[in-house]
Image (spheres, rainbow, N blue to C red):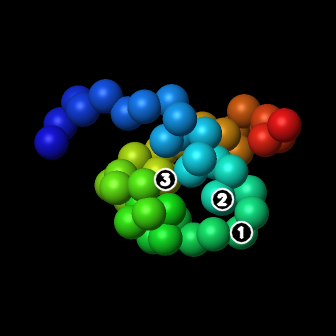
Amino acid sequence: MANKITDMSKIRKAIKFYCNGKSKLFISKYLSLSRNTVKKYISLFEVLGLSFE
């Protein structure tokens, strides 16, 4: 479904899982998000050079 709002809590969980070494496929299935959505937020996180803390 296009342009569906993603909760900030799911985005935080996705980044936390990624920092803990989980795969993007695992994250997308666990949080019921599309893989492209997970990739989008993880790539933004990496480009900005932020830490999870």
Q: Quick one: label 3, few (<14), some, or many (20+) residues within 10 Å?
A: some
- Marks 3 and 1: CB-CB under 8 Å? no
Q: Residues within 10 Å of mark 2 (few under 14, many from 20)?
A: some
Q: Circle 1 — which element?
A: loop
Q: Which residue is under mark 2? A: 18
Residue depicted at x 39% and y 66%: 29
> Could you tell me which secondary element the residue under label 3 belongs to?
helix
Vertical position of residue 46 compared to residue 48: above or below:
below
- Identify the mark nearer the N-term, 3 or 1: 1
Residue 33 % position (x, y): 36, 52
Report the residue marked by disc 3: 39
Q: Which quarter of the figure is the C terminus placed in? A: top right
Q: Are circles 2 and 1 on residues that touch, CB within 8 Å?
A: yes
Mark 1 = which residue? 21
Give the quadrant of the N terminus: top left
Q: Position of residue 11 (x, y in %)?
A: 53, 39
Of callouts 3 and 2, the N-terminal one: 2
Q: Is residue 31 left or right of residue 43?
A: left
Give, as a three-letter code, the residue at label 2.
Tyr
Q: Secondary structure at mark 2?
A: helix
Alpha carbons under labels 2 and 1: distance apart = 5 Å
Q: Amino acid at mark 1?
A: Gly
Name the residue rendered at 42%, 55% in the picture: 31
- Alpha-carbon distance for marks 3 and 2? 10 Å
- Horizontal side of residue 6 vs 45, given as left or right: left
Quarter of the view holding residue 49: top right
The residues bearing labels 3 and 1 have C-alpha atoms spaced at a distance of: 14 Å
